Image (spheres, grey):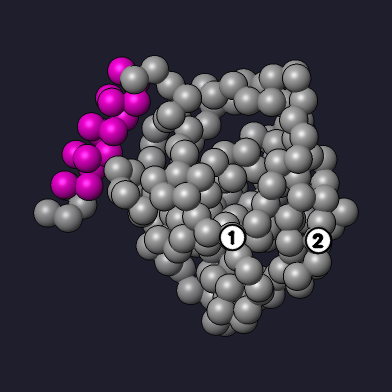
Amino acid sequence: MRGPAPSLKSLRMTKRPILIHPDPRLRKVASAVPDLSDELRRMADDMLKTMYDAPGIGLAAPQIGQNHRLIVLDCVKEKSEAPRPLVMFNPEIIASSDEKSVYEEGCLSIPEQYAEVTRPADVSVRWIDYNGNEQQEDFGGLWATCVQHEIDHLDGKLFIDYLTPLKRQLITRKMQKLKRERFR
Ligand code: NI
């Protein structure tokens, strides 16, 4: 089921700065959204713009320092295909396949670092869409990987948490160095 497309061409859309790991705000459990508001919809619009500009295929609200259970994603890879921006408030994985898939993941909060992560190959997700309607859909392939990666962000979890402590430390040190250089 396809949710109504957010107002992609809205002039109000603002690119927001993306937090870089390590940052305590990326490690918090985000709060459920009790009611949709124009402010939250605007946040979703901003997140889509931020994601597309990065460029990325998914972004979670904690990555822009917002402690809400809100993610956006668009895993359409082919330029010839129409974009499919999805906005999910309070997304929940309600079923996962036993079958696993391995994908080389990256994250906009951990720039230029990639590693293979094993996750369920297919997941069934329930969420509240841009218009406040409940949606449910089964995802496979890249969409399944991406939606799981983004929902992890809402629980303060990053893809590097699936790696060995040594690999995780190595990546974290690189990010600390990157941040020092950026703020110099
Ligand atoms: Ni990420």
Image mark for residue 92 = none
Picture coordinates of residue 111, whole percent (x, y) = 38, 41
Is 159 left, or right, of 86 in this rendering?
A: left
Q: Residue at x 19, y 39 (%)?
A: 177
Quadrant where the N terminus sits is bottom right
| Residue underneath mark 2 | 134
Q: Residue at x 60, y 65 (%)?
A: 33
Is 176 left, or right, of 69 in this rendering?
A: left
| Residue underneath mark 1 | 32
Q: Nearer the viewer, residue 75 or 37?
A: 37
Q: Nearer the viewer, residue 165 or 47?
A: 165
Query: Judging from the image, what secondary structure is the residue with disc 1 in?
Result: loop
Tag 1: Cα neighbours inside 10 Å, few (<14), some, or many (≥20)?
Answer: some
Q: CA distance from mark 1 to mark 2?
A: 14 Å
Q: Residue at x 63, y 79 (%)?
A: 37
Is 44 left, or right, of 95 in this rendering?
A: left
Identity, as a three-letter code, of the amino acid under mark 2: Glu
Picture coordinates of residue 93, whole percent (x, y) = 71, 41
Q: Is residue 85 visible in this depiction of the protein? A: no
Query: Judging from the image, what secondary structure is the residue with disc 2 in?
Result: strand
Instruction: Determine if the C-beta at disc 1 is less than 8 A from ligand 1.
Output: no
Residue placed furthest toward the left: 184
Q: Is residue 145 visible in this depiction of the protein? A: yes
Predominant secondary structure, magenta span: helix
Number of marks present in the image shown: 2
Q: Which residues are magenta?
A: 166-180
Identity, as a three-letter code, of the amino acid under mark 1: Ala
Rendered view: 182 above or below 48: above
Rendered view: 114 above or below 70: above
Picture coordinates of residue 64, whole percent (x, y) = 43, 60
